[in-house]
Image: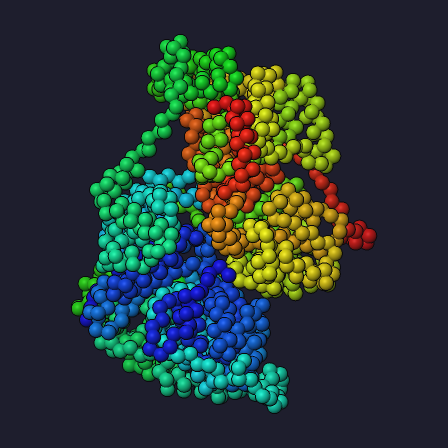
Amino acid sequence: MEVSFTQEIESLRLGNGQTFHGEGILAITKALLQSGVSYVGGYQGAPVSHLLDVMVQAKPYMDELGVHVEACSNEASAAAMLGASIHYPLRGAVTWKSIVGTNVAADALSNLASPGVTGGVLVVVGEDYGEGASVIQERTHAFALKSSMVLLDPRPDLACMVHMVEQGFRLSEASNMPAMMELRIRACHVRGSFTTKDNVKPALSRHQLIDEPASFDYNRLAHPPVTFRHEKLKGDERIPAARHYIVEHGLNEHFDGQHQDLGLIVQGGLYNTLIRALQQFGLADAFGDTAIPMLVLNVTCPLVPQQLTDFCVGKRAVLMLEEGQPEYIEQELATLLRRSDIQTPLHGKDMLPNAGEYTAEVMANGLAKFIGRYLQDPATQATADAARAWLQGNQTRRAEAAQQLQAPLPARPPGMCIGCPERPVFSALKLAQEDTGPVHIAGDIGCHALATFEPFSFGHSILGYGMSLASRAGVSPVMKRRVLSVMGDGGFWHNGLLTGVQSALFNGDDAVLLIFKNGYTSATGTQDIISTPDDDAKNSASDKQASLAHTNQTIETTLKGLGVQWMRTVNTYEVDTMRATLTEAFSTPFQGLKVIVAEGECQLERQRRIKPWIASLLKKGERVVRVKYGVDEDVCNGDHACIRLSGCPTLTLKDNPDPLKVDPVATVIDGCVGCGLCGANAHAATLCPSFYRAEVIQNPRWFERLVHSLRGSVVRMLQPS
Amino acid sequence: MSSNQQPISLLLCALGGEGGGILTDWLVETARHAGYAAQATSIPGVAQRTGATTYYLEVFPVPVSELDGRRPVFGLNPLPGRLDALVSSELLEAGRQITNGLASNTHTLVISSSARALTTGEKMVMGDGRRDAAELLALVNTHSRARHVLDMAALTKQAGTVVSAVMLGAIAGSGLLPFARRDYEAVMGDSSASAKASLRGFALAFDAVQAQRAQTAYVEQVLADEPEPTPTRARLPDALQHEFPPEVHELMALGHARVCEYQNAAYGDRYADRLRGVLAAEKQGDPQNLHGFRTTVEMARWIALWMAFDDIVLVADLKSRASRQARVRTEVKAGSDDLLRVYDHFKPGAPEFAAMLPVSLARRVLAWDRQRVAAGKSPWALPLKIGTHSVLGMLALRGLAATKRLRPLGSRFHTEQALIDRWLDAVVQLTALHAPLGHEVALCGRLIKGYGSTNERGKDNLLHIMDHLALPALAEPASGPQRCAAVASARQAALSDEAGVALDQALRQHGAPARPVKEQPIRWQHNPRLKVRAGT
């Protein structure tokens, strides 16, 4: 794993009255333990990876508590795990990235929500929406609505988030509904503190086993005809029970303010931003004291009709602040008001944008409209005017800044790491296409998706995690040239094996699949998978600098077992071989599925292993060889073809030291890990002869030193200055 | 309202892997250490791995002890224009946030590195695609209340640390936050080697920011045009000094020395002779010397570079010099006790060897290679990895370098001279007729560089532009001014993409034909799927 959580694991042990300092998602982890959770599962993905990672690393402590932790193979398997709480009073929690993970989990979630749960169930979803998001922009809210699940959206304050986890389990048990908690990226990564409680050992656990299985109960199955009864139960019993609990325990918060005739209704997760926006108009103070009454929905599904109508009745206007589209809450609220014949004007998406993150500026713009229409308060007039000028000024300033520039600034998308084993494959693919002509490339989720950016710009579609091979099924039959599907080993195990490989084999498809076997789900933080090199291989490796991806053959044996007949394994850094293999796959008469396993261990994990090993060798005064590539500045032709074929962050430009030449020359800066791509590309693509490979030998052996000095004296004689 | 006081807000910009998360943690810890409430957040999700990312921090400026148990509500994203500080480890990223409207000259202190980490888009351009730093610095100046611009990359290197420590030092030095220096230093630890390096980096940036006046001076210095690097003084022979105007001397001296070193003194005379023709033409085309002999100056550069074209003999010579070995030692940071092995990557093909052979032999070698390609094989080439540190490797390189004298017998030498003269003639004729057009064609010398296919492509492009856009001016002199613009835009386009899509577009736009399609073997591929259709 990319991050080590030694310190955080200690924080998980904190007891009554102590203070936890740290990240939001880890506070949630602690809250699960405080709630007496029996089992935890999930699938990694930003921004919730840390929840599971820290629990996996804290295995000894989890064993102590009796909490079972399962690193699931995908979100569907995590959701299915929650089935344990249907019959048994076990509290369970799972986590994943939404909306993508929720989509994968959909089948199991529906079948869980229908019979309902006995033990409390909490699905912690990282809502990857808005600025910096990496997936499609959709709301988890829709899922909670259609499956009748509870949806929690707590204020992004650690104490509130922790409180809502604890309440979430109780609410789930009181209503038999599974609960989801949506945490926006910034809330997951917020750094704050809260006062902890003792962890609760679950009553039923790995230590306290269940004696007998539950007796057979057809009502607990998601199977007709009882599913029709479940449908009735949802509306007649579960949702009312949930509403009752929400009101009784004050889960939604009502903050009063002096302007009684106005109101703001807001999703809990947006509360802080709304307060900061109100401050700009002088309508809230630093401590959240608001001048306009506010109803904060820490539970956004189900809504409590009475609570909403009570808040709205008698007001001149109410503004609903709801992020994303469609505006489910606003629509329900409008229906409620209409049904109760309450005439309070309701505003929302008419004053705020339909799509996009509700940042402080976006909210302030919406508030400006609302306040402008309904609030004339001499006490805050000056501040409000200044706020309006500020908002206007932002537009002007942006326009001015853009005008000041000759052209828009170049983008800086994420890229593959220094020495990444996947980069050479794309270099080879670029070269192979020079021979075969361009091919349609079905892309996938994972680090290799970064090849969609410069300098490669590869990939025609991304249909989901592990979906690349399946997504070519309709393209390849109608395409003259073969279609290439690119998949990581993470995607392969997540979904690709079944949806892609099995289907292609069954249908006898003519397809080319390239699997990046780097040993980890690297893009989510290098979590282990079934094809990760095991600890024995890592410990016994004599040269720890070498890739260890080949030590685990699970992917190859699986593919053979399924009946793949054309399979090639290629070391990714051998650009020439990879180019030839790709060309062969694109042109061979063999008609079935062709799989190229591109083998090269994730460089992040490799460096994690190498660095302490090298440090220990140097400390002991032992021999160490360090490799770095370089460019001869007087030989480099300034054409930068090497960069267009690599994109490595350490291969960059510097001013041409030759006063006659004008174009900058390539240079390799510090940080080069000596992966060998520069040399391989120089040969494979016949680049200019400016690249050299330097091997620096620290603590050389005595005879090496002797040979070197003899050789050096001859070489010096031959050399001109 | 009981308090209108708002938190102090900071937006930190960093690139993935620069320790932005650690910096944020340090700041939150420092606040706690100093007794202030603070909150930070980030969106590192997709910005992983060298992409641009931001971290956002708010600190309440009143100590917790004076808040009577009340807790401030902190924001999770910055208020554009009301941001108190924008801190960036990279100049372009500071500029990006400014164009996003985050910083304003009423509110924001901008602390930015002057160092650039070039984006891939800038690096991959065939010429020079780097953004002008002065433009970015101007942006910082316009949109900040106050600013500290310092070379954080240099300070980081000097301290042997990560840029996050330097950023922390700069923030501390600016006095923006109500914390003492010891509060910051306390959270960085002090025992381990990395903590010591962090503290060094912190101190360097702290002092640099504190030295306000020096900083202001620094910005002005950066903003001023950077002085050209002083070239190693080459002296032009006296006779040429007298013959050519002073404007030309500097580059001509370099060019003359270059071609003499490349071949011999006679080759230097040939260079001077070529330039003589240009000078005469320019005197004719621009009799009042309005442009300071700019075409001759440019040609002094480009003729020299073309005449000293890159071939394996030159590369062998450059790679086997002692000065080169010393340079590599510094570049790879080899210690004095470390041994260094250097391997050079070469892949000469048939054209490289043919270049060394007399014309008739060269033709046969190339014909053989073309046959190979026609038969579906890849062109012949010899991938070599030569250990320049070894005796054999050095002997091989010196041996090759020693064939310099034979170079004029080789086929390539003849081809190049002929092409140079063709281009030179065009420049001379056009300069005499319409000086600006001649100048534009002279500037096209920039297209000629490199080895193998890169070099071929450059030559093809130059000739195509010359023949179709420039030379028709000789027949219709009135079209001169219009052709100037055409040549300039085609030259730019030729440098913008390898495939020449932009160039073809530019050519067509100016009424010239696109470049001819290069022949390439076609591989036929049997597709059994089509059999079904054939059978029915």
Q: On the picture, is B6 further left or further right than A440? A: left
**Position of residue B83 measured from the top left corner of the image (x, y, whole percent):** 28, 56
**Position of residue A191 measured from the top left corner of the image (x, y, whole percent):** 36, 65
Residue at figure coordinates x 35%, y 43% from the top left:
B158
Is residue B445 shown above or below A271? above
Evaluate whether residue B434 shows in this view: no
Evaluate whether residue A598 shows in this view: yes
Outermost right residue: B535
Residue at figure coordinates x 55%, y 30% from the top left:
A710
Residue at figure coordinates x 27%, y 69% from the top left:
B72
Q: How is the image coloured?
A: rainbow
Is residue A59 shown above or below A718? below
Q: Quadrant of residue A30?
A: bottom left
**Position of residue B443 measured from the top left corner of the image (x, y, whole percent):** 45, 26
Q: Nearer the viewer, residue A630 or A656?
A: A630
Q: Nearer the viewer, residue B124 or A147?
A: B124
Is residue A265 shown above or below B207? below
Q: On the picture, is A408 further left or further right than B402? A: left
